[in-house]
Image: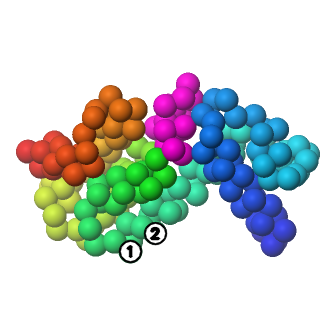
């Protein structure tokens, strides 16, 4: 991929992120993104089929950030993920809670599951031990990731009115009981 292509893709993703700060994904149009990126619609369509293909690229972008964060951090996986969501709260609120929220939810479950599986290879905390001792480690990771994302989604939607520290307590209770 050449420099101009990569730069334009990043510009489009950054504009998408910027627009997501003010609108739910379901309300965003390609024109909104183009106006923010100061590009013509034809430029957008040179790189993306539609806003859903951009969402997939955005999810990939998030997963790369989370994987790097997990590799750099020696803290609890869940704490790192909750901290990341808290730092990018509006983005998650505008993507997870809209009518198309299931797309990001499913992707985030996959990302969390992959991170747990990867972490379990070298980790020695209770969840890694449970995953490694299981006859079905991939299913265990999916189960934990789905539980985690459901709790997180309910926290973002304010259905659960817990402080961040209480979330960690809940995760510990659910995951390690």
**Label 2 sits on residue:** 68
Q: Is residue 144 visible?
A: no
Q: Circles 2 and 1: CB distance less than 8 Å? A: yes
Name the quarter where the N terminus is drawn: bottom right
Q: Is residue 2 visible?
A: yes
Q: Quadrant of residue 72?
A: bottom left
Q: Quadrant of residue 21?
A: top right
Name the quarter where the C terminus is drawn: top left
The majority secondary structure of the magenta stretch comes to helix
Name the one closer to the observer, 89 or 176. Answer: 89
**Looking at the image, is 41 positioned above or below residue 129?**
above
Please state if 175 lies on the left or on the right of 114 as rendered: left
Q: Quadrant of residue 160?
A: top left
**Label 1 sits on residue:** 72
Please state if 161 lies on the left or on the right of 100 as rendered: left
User: Which range of residues does the magenta coloring cover?
Assistant: 90-107
């Amino acid at each position: 991929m050449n420099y101009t292509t990569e730069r334009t893709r990043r510009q489009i993703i950054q504009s998408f992120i910027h627009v997501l700060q003010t609108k739910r994904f379901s309300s965003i149009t390609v024109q909104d993104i183009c106006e923010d990126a100061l590009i013509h619609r034809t430029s957008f369509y040179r790189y993306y089929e539609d806003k859903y293909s951009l969402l997939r690229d955005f999810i990939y972008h998030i997963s790369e950030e989370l994987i790097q964060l997990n590799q750099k951090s020696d803290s609890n996986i869940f704490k790192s993920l909750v901290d990341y969501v808290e730092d990018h709260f509006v983005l998650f609120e505008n993507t997870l809670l809209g009518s198309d929220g299931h797309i990001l939810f499913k992707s985030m479950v996959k990302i969390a599951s992959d991170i747990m599986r990867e972490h379990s290879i070298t980790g020695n905390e209770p969840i890694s031990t449970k995953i490694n001792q299981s006859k079905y480690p991939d299913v265990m990771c999916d189960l934990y990731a789905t539980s985690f994302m459901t709790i997180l989604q309910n926290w973002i939607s304010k259905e659960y009115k817990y402080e961040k520290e209480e979330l960690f307590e809940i995760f510990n209770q659910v995951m390690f009981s």
